[in-house]
Image: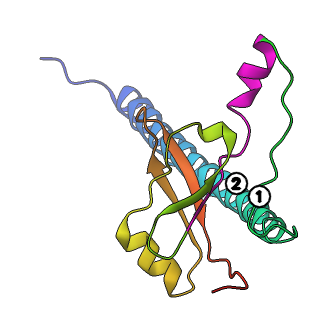
Amino acid sequence: MIRPGFRTRLALWHAAATTAILLAVALSADWLLTRTVIAQLDAALLVIAETEAGSSLDGPAGLHLHELDTLPGPASRGLHKLDKLVQIIDDRGTVLLRSATLGHTDMPAPPSLVARVRRGETIIETAAWHDGEPIRLVTLPIGTSGA
């Protein structure tokens, strides 16, 4: 077997080093971009959740949801999925109200999550939706006048 010359080995070494550096930079950039996007999404979701929580208590009839009006037709059905999904549960995990976008489906509310919210924690997490698709959830406590 013929041993490659010094220039060939040097070129291969430089190619391997450059590939490793580019791979490390690409992975780092992807990780940083993912963290930034998730942080921005979480901040936006928290604002929406706090707004919905505050507005759910502002009516004279007590606890209620503000639903968006949808237009009839196929275009609204496609956009309907982009709307927020809101569910209000009591301190035992029983669903009190849910937005029309949820239909008859309940958002996941395991007992461990309910216990954390009962202690006053605001939780932002990713959960599996009914079709296996991941969704980002914000769970926060809201106080009612009867609580």
Rendered view: 73 above or below 62: above
Residue 44 is situated, as x and y percent measured from the top left of the image, at: 77, 58
Q: Is residue 80 magenta?
A: yes
Question: Mark 1 Cα within 10 Å, few/some/many (few <14, many 20+)?
Answer: few
Q: Is residue 37 visible?
A: yes
Q: Are marks 2 and 1 in contact (CB under 8 Å)?
A: yes
Identify the amino acid type marked 2: Leu
Q: According to the image, label 1 marks what residue?
A: 44
In the rendered picture of this protein, how many numbered marks are placed on residues? 2
Identify which amino acid the numbered label 1 is placed on.
Answer: Ala
Q: Residue at x 53, y 38 (%)?
A: 104
What's the residue at 60%, 40% (across, down)? 102
Of the 4 image quadrants, the one containing the N terminus is top left
Tell me the distance, in whole angstroms, between the alpha carbons under discs 2 and 1: 5 Å
Q: Residue 41: give its label.
A: 2
Does residue 32 appear anywhere in the picture? no
Q: Is residue 24 left or right of residue 86?
A: left
Could you say where residue 47 lies in the image, as x and y percent from the top left?
A: 79, 64
Of 65 and 19, the residue lying toward us: 65
The quadrant in which residue 2 appears is top left
Question: Which residues, given as a range, are shown in magenta?
Answer: 74-89
Residues packed near mark 2 inside 10 Å, few (<14), some (14 to 19) or many (20 plus): few
Return the x and y of residue 26 as percentages of the image width and height.
56, 42
Image: 62 above or below 23: below
In this rendered view, identify the residue nearer to me: 39 or 146.
146
Residue at 62% in and 77% down: 141
Residue 80 as seen in the image, left or right of residue 22: right
Between 29 and 121, which is closer to the camera in this rendering? 121
Q: Is residue 121 above or below residue 31?
A: below
Extreme residue toward the front, this view: 61
Coordinates of residue 25 in the picture (x, y in percent)? 57, 48
